[in-house]
Amino acid sequence: IGQRINVDKNAPPEVPYWIPYLGSAIAFSVNPLKFYADNRKKYGDVFTYTMVGRKFTVCLGVEGNNFVFNAKLADVSAEESYKPLTTPVFGKGVVYDCPNHMLMEQKKFVKWGMSNDAFRAYVPEIEEETRNYFQRWNNKTGGRGDLFKAMGELIINTASRTLMGPEIRALMDDSVAQLYHDLDDGFQPINMFFEWLPLPSYFRRDNAHIKMRNIFKQVIDERRANNVTDKTDMLQSLLNQTYKDGTPFTDVDACHLMIALLMAGQHTSSTTATWALLHLAEHPHLIKELLAEQKDVLGSLDTPLSFDAMKNMTLLENVIRETLRLRPPIIMILRKVIRPITFPGTDYVIPKGNYIAASPIATQVDEQFYKNAMSFDPHRWESIKEEESGESVDYGFGKIAGGGARNPNLPFGAGRHRCIGETFAYVQLKTVISTFVRMYDLSLTEKGMPGQDFTKMFVQPVLPVEINYTPRK
Ligand code: HEM
């Protein structure tokens, strides 16, 4: 027990630890930002720490972001990092359970289901879902609502109505919601480390996976039996796809990819919606400004929202951008090193078997890049230009700015694994937030702003999260 000394003299400096195997797991999960800041002072931007028997080399700063996000396929593997967690939940043959070139093609299949025309159709549906959901909060005097729970339920309803199709949405209020919860319980950090443990939650997860796949399969079978071709949702766009080499993308593959997309978009969007509304409650003048912006763009607060009108709502967009800067749901992006790699500008050689980790949250809250970095100020984005990126790389699912990975603000990642759900997430969040502030005024409870719970797969506010609301006249 005690300080470990690196055997390899070129390996990056290593954070000492006293509890064998567990290493720095507790310090990291209590507050990763403090853990990074403390160790950065001692070791600089690149250092290695141990958690649950594995070595993570974190690469901080914009160069660190770029290094991890643009690392070469021959050097690192995302599949090797995420597979134990994702394959039991998503199923076989998709995302990290197939070679990377197949994932790139899968992302392209999905892209076609997220066109501007599709978004135009989604906005009224999301607005209606939001109104219907929050009607149940309605009473003359207002009250206190469980915001986190509400956003979790609402986002699953809106995502299923738009992306998954009306058949799945119809089942969402009962059976599918429960299955989703069981799948979700099996999607926790513990699964990455102890995938072999016979935990009851793993049995529920596996059972839920089979049932969920069967539900999607039944919907596909019915669409095929009835020759349905007029649907614009994502499920439809996944049918009849073929890989470039002629391998068919089967209906079971489509079911598995739908489950993956459900999981990828759910917590990320629902925690972002929760934080955005909490920050608005913290800064009530922003709610007034948002309503004024809606009135300005639409003429009246009774005019329905639309995809095109919301493009002109700059403050609304900046509220979401600022929420994601300060409260990104994904704070650690991993790649397993499969061939030793040197960190540019240093002698550090990161050994095979380590995980390299990018944590863009560190640059997102760094004073070097953002003045008063810890305060919520959507107006700051009015004077920040989106980074003009250098080269543009086509990974098969559309051009992605390669140089863009040197950006300090990367809540959606960068490079070949970059998020494909960003525009959808913005459309969904913009519609939900605008509709909510039209219906209610809101304020924080006496507890104030909640802290961040870093022990979850997707960082979320410490629960319970309640909010005071008053219906607008
Ligand atoms: C990838 C964040 C919403 C689907 C990613 C990555 C991040 C991210 C950081 C990169 C992961 C890595 O490099 O290892 C977010 C945030 C969201 C969001 C913050 C909402 C606020 C969505 C939605 C969908 C989605 C709504 C789908 C409907 C995906 C997919 C990938 C991805 C398919 C690609 C995984 C890969 O290539 O390895 N997302 N996401 N995400 N996301 Fe999102």
Image (tube, rainbow, N blue to C red):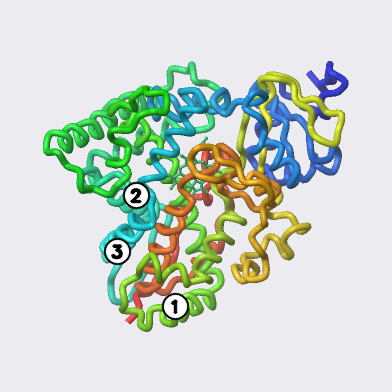
| Residue at 46% in and 23% down | 97
Residue 392 percent location from the top left of the image: 62, 46
Q: Amino acid at mark 1?
A: Leu
126 left or right of 370 in image: left
Q: Nearer the viewer, residue 162 or 128?
A: 162
Q: Is residue 22 visible?
A: no
| Residue at 50% in and 44% down | 398
Residue 438 percent location from the top left of the image: 37, 74
Q: Nearer the viewer, residue 310 or 465?
A: 310
Mark seen at residue 318: none
Q: Amino acid at mark 2?
A: Ala
Q: Quadrant of residue 126?
A: bottom left
Please name which of the two marks, 3 or 2, marks the residue nearer to the observer.
3
Secondary structure type for disc 3:
helix
Q: Amino acid at mark 3?
A: Pro
Marks 1 and 2, Cα distance to the nearest angstrom?
25 Å
Confirm if mark 3 falls within 8 A of ligand 1.
no
Residue ID for mark 2: 159
Residue ID for mark 3: 124
Crowding at label 2, few (<14), some or many (≥20) Cα neighbours within 10 Å? many
Crowding at label 1, few (<14), some or many (≥20) Cα neighbours within 10 Å? some
Q: Pick whichever of labels 3 and 2 is earlier in the sequence.
A: 3
